[in-house]
């Protein structure tokens, strides 16, 4: 009965032994000549990877620190902007109040000067009116009486006329 399993014969066993011996020889050669170099290369590579990971972690920490500093700077700038706007608004209000106060002062000065001018013109008009009334009174008195008046007569008539005008 033939077995359907692998048939083992002498040539197969010889090939397996040769391949096993070759593998062991290759393994021993690699172990003796190259193992330390491979191990050193792998350790260097591991150090480089660890160093890169450390640098990446440090860079990430620095980036987060810079981001926080940036956020603080931006918050400070925002606060400063708000303070400047508030200060400018207050300054504007103060300037407005000052301008309004100066305008009121100027208006009061103009009104006061106008009142003084009106009083001066009224006084002048009253004086001119008195003078013309006095002149007309003298003229009328001279025509009615038919005689000329002396300085004393003029002074007395002026006093009487002024008294009458003040009463009116």
Image (tube, rainbow, N blue to C red):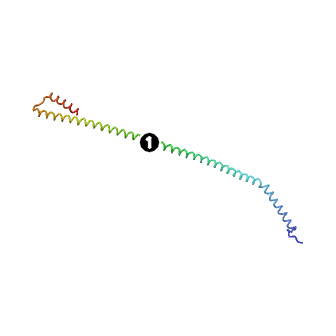
What percent of the width, then of the height, locates residue 79?
Answer: 53, 44
Report the residue at 51% width, 44% height from top.
Answer: 82
Q: Outermost residue, top direction?
A: 152
What percent of the width, then of the height, locates residue 116?
Answer: 29, 36
- The residue pinned by badge 1 equals 93
Q: In the image shown, does 123 or 73 lie closer to the viewer?
A: 123
Report the residue at 44% width, 42% height from top.
Answer: 93
Point out the image quarter for the C terminus. top left
**Which quadrant would residue 14 be assigned to in this image?**
bottom right
Point out the image quarter for the N terminus. bottom right
**Which quadrant would residue 129 be assigned to in this image?**
top left
Q: Outermost residue, bottom direction?
A: 1
On the rendered structure, is 147 left or right of 168? Answer: left
What percent of the width, then of the height, locates residue 103?
Answer: 37, 40
Neighbours of disc 1 within 10 Å: few (<14), some (14-19), many (20+): few
Q: Outermost residue, left direction?
A: 146
Depicted 55 relative to depicted 104: above or below = below
């Amino acid at each position: 009965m033939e077995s359907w399993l692998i048939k083992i014969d002498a040539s197969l066993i010889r090939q397996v032994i040769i391949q096993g011996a070759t593998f062991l020889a290759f393994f021993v050669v690699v172990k003796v000549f190259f193992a330390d170099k491979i191990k050193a290369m792998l350790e260097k590579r591991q150090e480089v990877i660890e160093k890169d990971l450390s640098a990446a972690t440090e860079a990430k920490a620095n980036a987060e620190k810079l981001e926080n500093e940036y956020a603080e700077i931006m918050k400070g700038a925002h606060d400063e902007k708000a303070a400047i706007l508030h200060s400018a608004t207050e300054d504007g209000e103060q300037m407005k109040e000052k301008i309004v106060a100066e305008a009121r002062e100027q208006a009061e000065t103009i009104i006061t000067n106008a009142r003084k001018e009106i009083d001066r013109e009224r006084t002048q008009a009253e004086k001119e009116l008195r003078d013309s009334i006095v002149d007309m009174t003298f003229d009328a008195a001279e025509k009615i009486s038919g005689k000329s008046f002396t300085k004393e007569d003029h002074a007395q008539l002026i006093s009487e006329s002024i008294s009458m005008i003040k009463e009116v």
